[in-house]
Amino acid sequence: MPVLHIAQDPAADELLSRDPLALVVGMMLDQQFPMERAFGAPRLLADRLGVDTLSAEQLASIDPEELVAIFQRPPALHRYPGSMAGRAQEVCRALVADHDGQVTGLWADDPDGATLLRRLKALPGFGAQKASIFLALLGKQYGVTVPGWREAAGEYGTEGSRRSVADITGPESLAEVRAFKQEQKQAAKAAKEPAGK
């Protein structure tokens, strides 16, 4: 079993390490929200549901209003708990429809990296960048090293990089990833400023 240190919380990271659906939900929530809280949210969700492991079938079939209420309860599972509860349910419904409710069904047939990337992009809320980062996370830390995964993940698959959640293995690498993202933001901001300022 992989040992992840993304949420920087032992109970949350323990769930992420053994439950691929928790990892997918954490990745889905990782937008416009602090990363540690996004990846800590699956543990809170499991606790509120009274379960040890998340179930795509359960989340797909739960009453949507009930799920929103679970997401909204303080501390909220996301900055936008209503829309993210709906997104989580959409992801789970897609997994039930296409992979018998099992996240591992995405790679159980040992596809190549490009095929797995395409399957990840098909998940609701997983755009090109998020799918690439998640593919890199699976390859770097989850033991899902399908042929060509690094190439399919692009720059996120580069060994030794500090670009994304795929590279976070503890507080030090978290700080390095944060610094990289800050540099990227500043570079993007500088590129937008008119010349001569």
Image (cartoon, rainbow, N blue to C red):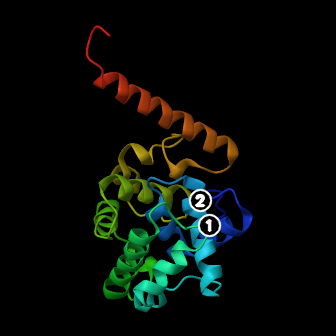
Res. 145 in view:
no
Question: In which quarter of the view is residue 7 placed?
Answer: bottom right
Q: Position of residue 172 (x, y in %)?
A: 68, 41
User: Quarter of the image containing the N terminus?
Assistant: bottom right
> Is residue 172 placed above or below 27 in the rendered structure?
above
Q: Position of residue 84 (x, y in %)?
A: 42, 69
The one nearer the camera, 53 or 114, is 53
Most extreme residue toward the top is: 196
User: Quarter of the image containing the C terminus?
Assistant: top left
The one nearer the camera, 13 or 33, is 33
Most extreme residue toward the right is: 10
> Is residue 170 placed above or below 44 in the rendered structure?
above
Circle 1: residue type: Pro
Q: Are marks 2 and 1 in contact (CB under 8 Å)?
A: yes
The residue positioned 35% from the left and 84% from the top of the image is 93
Q: Which mark is residue 37?
A: 2
> Is residue 177 placed above or below 16 in the rendered structure?
above
Question: In which quarter of the view is residue 132 placed?
Answer: bottom left
Question: In the image, 178: left or right of 171?
Answer: left
Mark 2 or mark 1, earlier in chain: 2
Q: Position of residue 71 (x, y in %)?
A: 52, 74
The one nearer the camera, 124 or 80, is 80
The residue positioned 43% from the left and 48% from the top of the image is 157
SS state under label 2? helix
Q: Which mark is residue 75?
A: 1
Report, in whole angstroms, how far the alpha carbon at label 2 lies from the one at label 1: 10 Å
The residue positioned 34% from the left and 63% from the top of the image is 126
Q: Position of residue 134 (x, y in %)?
A: 44, 59
Circle 2: residue type: Arg
Tell me the crowding category of disc 2: few under 14, some 14 to 19, or many 20 or more residues within 10 angstroms, Cα based.
many
